[in-house]
Image: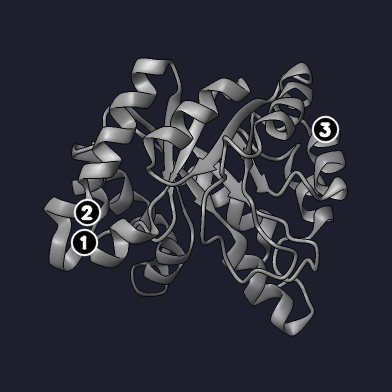
């Protein structure tokens, strides 16, 4: 079954808005695992507007499942954090310093030398590496050439067009997953996946190993509760 990694950035956003420790980010992560999540994802950004760097250190000894840290390796503070914490997986995302949310994948061809160097550093530390990419076959071939272990398919366009053009919009993702598996790259996916569109994506993506979901899942939990929501998402992945 495809693993569900819960992105807890939004919990940190709510906490930070009042300056205290409510909701308790660490307890939410522990509970998410207890309720069935098979991983926890965080994406610290330079301004620490949601996940703080200290949160990452605090989470590491508490988690029993896979810890996935996302971020831009061109930010040295991020690189130092990952190498110090040594999560099970690092996902490299080409975000700008003040970017609201991730909105594009890497150009793995133009950045081949740089990505190869960074991936080598992370892998030498025993950290599985994943590159955030659009469903572009050339970019996936480029990802393979960098030495990455996995790709994470950027699924915003799929989610945006799912309700009107799902048969059309799924095609590049299906082709991307087939090529990635042929090349020996593991396939993850994330961005705007939800209860509405997740099952169809999973059914049409070859050997999908992991999805990272935050915004939709945390929003759904306001209505259904966190435990029930995680179970609903897990059902979509069977």
Question: Residue, x 52% and y 49% (percent of image)?
Answer: 105
Query: How packed is label 3: few (under 14 Cα within 10 Å), some, or many (20 or more)?
Result: some
Q: Which residue is mark 2?
A: 169
Q: Are marks 2 and 1 in contact (CB under 8 Å)?
A: yes
Q: Which residue is at the front of the view, 59 or 135?
A: 135
Q: Position of residue 41 (x, y in %)?
A: 58, 47
Query: Which is closer to the viewer, label 2 or label 3?
Result: 2
Q: Residue at x 43, y 34 (%)?
A: 138
Q: Tags 2 and 3 in contact by the CB under 8 Å rule?
A: no
- Which comes sooner in the sequence, label 1 or label 3? 3
Marks 2 and 1, how far apart at CA: 7 Å
- Mark positioned earlier in the residue sequence (2 or 1): 1
100 relative to 201, above or below: below
Q: Is residue 235 left or right of residue 8?
A: left
**The N terminus: image quadrant:** top left
Q: Is residue 225 visible?
A: yes
What quarter of the picture does the C terminus occupy? top left
Crowdedness of circle 2 by 10 Å Cα count: few (<14), some, many (20+)? some
2 or 1: mark nearer the eye: 2
Question: Residue under circle 3?
Answer: 83
Residue with the mark numbered 1: 162
């Amino acid at each position: 079954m495809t693993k569900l990694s819960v992105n807890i950035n939004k919990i940190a956003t709510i906490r930070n808005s009042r300056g205290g420790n409510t909701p308790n980010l660490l307890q939410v992560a522990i509970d998410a695992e207890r309720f069935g999540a098979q991983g926890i994802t965080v994406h610290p950004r330079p301004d620490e507007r949601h996940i703080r760097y200290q949160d990452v250190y605090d989470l590491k000894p508490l988690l029993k499942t896979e810890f996935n840290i996302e971020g831009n390796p061109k930010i040295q503070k991020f690189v130092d954090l990952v190498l110090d914490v040594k999560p099970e997986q690092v996902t490299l995302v080409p975000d700008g310093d003040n970017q609201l949310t991730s909105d594009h994948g890497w150009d793995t061809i133009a950045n081949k030398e740089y990505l190869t160097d960074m991936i080598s550093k992370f892998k030498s530390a025993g950290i599985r590496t994943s590159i955030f990419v659009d469903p572009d076959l050339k970019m996936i071939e480029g990802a393979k050439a960098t030495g990455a272990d996995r790709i994470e398919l950027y699924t915003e366009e799929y989610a945006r067009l799912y309700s009107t053009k799902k048969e059309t919009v799924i095609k590049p993702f299906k082709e991307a997953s087939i090529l990635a598996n042929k090349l020996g790259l593991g396939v993850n996916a994330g961005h705007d996946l939800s209860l509405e569109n997740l099952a169809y994506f999973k059914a049409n993506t070859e050997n999908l190993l992991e999805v990272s979901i935050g915004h939709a899942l945390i929003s759904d939990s306001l209505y259904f509760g966190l435990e029930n929501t995680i179970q609903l998402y897990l059902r979509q992945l069977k």
